[in-house]
Amino acid sequence: MFKSQSSLILTDHTILTIALSHGFQNVSAYNQLFKKIYRKTPTEFRRIHRH
């Protein structure tokens, strides 16, 4: 999960591509765990942390 943060911030890859490349079976599982840990969706996280 931690390693996927840099992909969200530094690339334009889709959330699906990032989820799959970090070992998740599907984007739903990634989104659920991400939101549980960070209290934000991956899309919200990306929007907030991009420069």
Image (cartoon, rainbow, N blue to C red):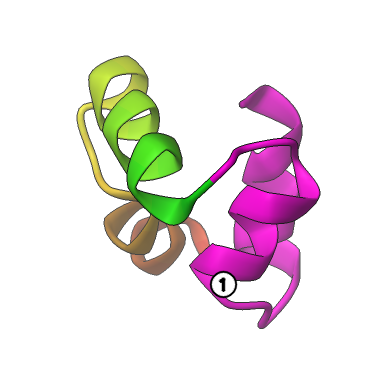
Q: Is 25 on the left-hand or right-hand side of 27?
A: right
Q: Nearer the viewer, residue 26 or 15?
A: 26
Going 38% across and 31% down the picture, which residue do you hit?
34
Residue type highlighted by circle 1 = His
Question: Would residue 42 appear left or right of 41 to someone viewing this image?
Answer: right
The residue beneath circle 1 is: 51
Q: Quadrant of the N terminus?
A: top right
Q: Is residue 36 above or below residue 34?
A: above
Residue 19: in magenta span: yes
Q: Is residue 24 magenta?
A: yes
Q: Report which quarter residue 32 is drawn in.
A: top left
The magenta stretch spans which residues? 1-25
Identify the residue shown where x is 45% and y is 61%: 46
Point out residue 16 in the picture as x, y percentages from the top left corner.
54, 66
Coordinates of residue 13 in the picture (x, y in percent): 68, 78
Q: Residue at x 25, y 19 (%)?
A: 36
Residue 24 position within the rendered picture, expressed as x and y whole percent measured from the top left = 61, 38
Relative vertical location of residue 19 with respect to residue 24 in this rendering, above or below? below
Q: In terms of secondary structure, what is the magenta stretch mainly? A: helix
Give the residue at x 75% y 40%: 22
Callout 1 secondary element = loop
Front position in the image: 33 or 51: 33
